[in-house]
Image (cartoon, grey):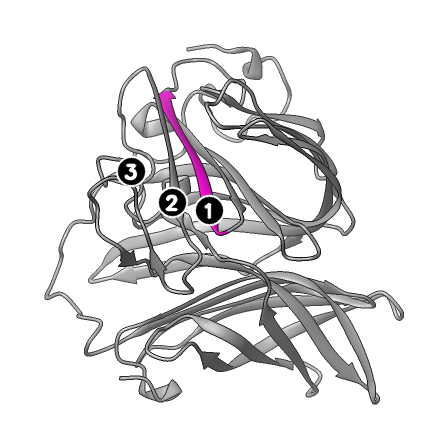
Amino acid sequence: MLTELDDCLWHQLPTTFDHVGTSDPRFFDRFWFAAYARDGSCALQFTMGVYRNMNVMDGGFVLVLGGQQYNVRVSRSLGQHNVVECGPLSIEVVQPLRSFTLRVEGADRVNAELHWTAVSKPVEEAPHFRRLNGRIVEDYQRFNQIGTVSGRLVVDGQEIIVEDWWACRDHSWGVRNGMAVPEVQTGPKDALDKRGFTMAFLFFSAPPLSGTLLLSHREGEPAYVSGELMDATTRKSLIVSNIVLKPDLHPGTRRFRSVEILSELTDGTTVAVQCEQSGNAIAMQGLGYSGGYNDRKGLGFWRGENVVEQDVWDVSHPADIAYPDDRKTAPHWHRIQPVKVSYINEETEFQGHGSLTLILAGSLPSLGLN
């Protein structure tokens, strides 16, 4: 079916824009934004995704303040509408690759108008491609960017002025496991107690250095590593060839107090970035990730014409989430932590801010975790 997007000169396939180049139901196209008060007092994230083969647009907004996480999750039928708007959430692309307006209008307890502005160029990751037992389980692309956010929030009637908060974002699209439909089983399950999983994803800026680092590793397999650092002094781009983690965990948990990330560069040098937690970590289920939504089906499932879910969780504990009503307190493995960042170069310490996802799941003898 023709839409207004078809009246442009940027087609990539011999079909209309309401089709994508694969029938895989897991095909997605997704924005993710984060912004953190520099003193660690408040953190927020905003996301919106389209699943063309599932006829779904969904998204979420979370705000962490005073140990409480305010969640808004939305979902609707995609139809032929090309506006990035779902329930009370909307994203306006003011200038591609440069500026965006994020709005939450009409939610019960939180509302927002936020202006995201880039301070660095977007950087593409190495392509994500993985087969399992002959089947493609990942084939997607992502780029990352550092920015700032200004605007206003209203939380339970209290106004918060947002001025120059540290921010980052990514944009990813393609086929990714865990999206839209349950994964099919094509062989024996590879339990985490036998081969654990590590994922570290850092956005940071501590002038003159900034960039993103990504490590994804299943024990016994080659690690996926993607990273690029920008040195504002020399204007050189530094490409990362390997990443080594040295985490300091809260006792009895897999949640970190601090992490040293050693980035080995293609020129043979190493950059050591120290990350210290700043404020409370965001529980990504609040946005709909990792089995989020009340039906526990996660992202990309068709739920109806217009669905809005809102709740408040206690995330003050470093590992456990206290859910409302009669639901038990439970740990959640997918959390994103605002961090203070530092590194030393020629005996000078540089400091800044960042956003770190660190997942340490199952048996990880390489990190001394069983």
Q: CA distance from mark 2 to mark 3?
A: 25 Å
Residue marked by disc 1: 68
Q: CA distance from mark 1 to mark 3?
A: 29 Å
Q: Residue at x 58, y 26 (%)?
A: 157
The first of marks 2 and 1 along the sequence is 1
Q: Main secondary structure of the magenta part?
A: strand
The first of marks 1 and 3 along the sequence is 1
Residue 299 counted in the magenta span = no
The first of marks 2 and 3 along the sequence is 3
* Mark 3: amino acid: Ala
Residue 75 counted in the magenta span = yes
Q: Position of residue 201 (x, y in %)?
A: 52, 63
Q: Is residue 159 visible?
A: yes
Range of residues picked out in magenta: 67-76
Q: Residue at x 58, y 77 (%)?
A: 241
* Residue 138 in the image: above or below residue 157: below
In this picture, residue 163 sits left or right of residue 224: right
Q: Position of residue 45 (x, y in %)?
A: 54, 43
Residue count near mark 3 (Cα–Cα under 10 Å), binned few <14, some 14–19, many ≥20: many
Residue marked by disc 3: 180
Q: Are marks 2 and 1 in contact (CB under 8 Å)?
A: yes
Q: CA distance from mark 2 to mark 1?
A: 6 Å
* Mark 1: amino acid: Gln
Q: Are marks 1 and 3 in contact (CB under 8 Å)?
A: no
In this rendering, which labeled residue sits more in front, label 1 or label 3? 1
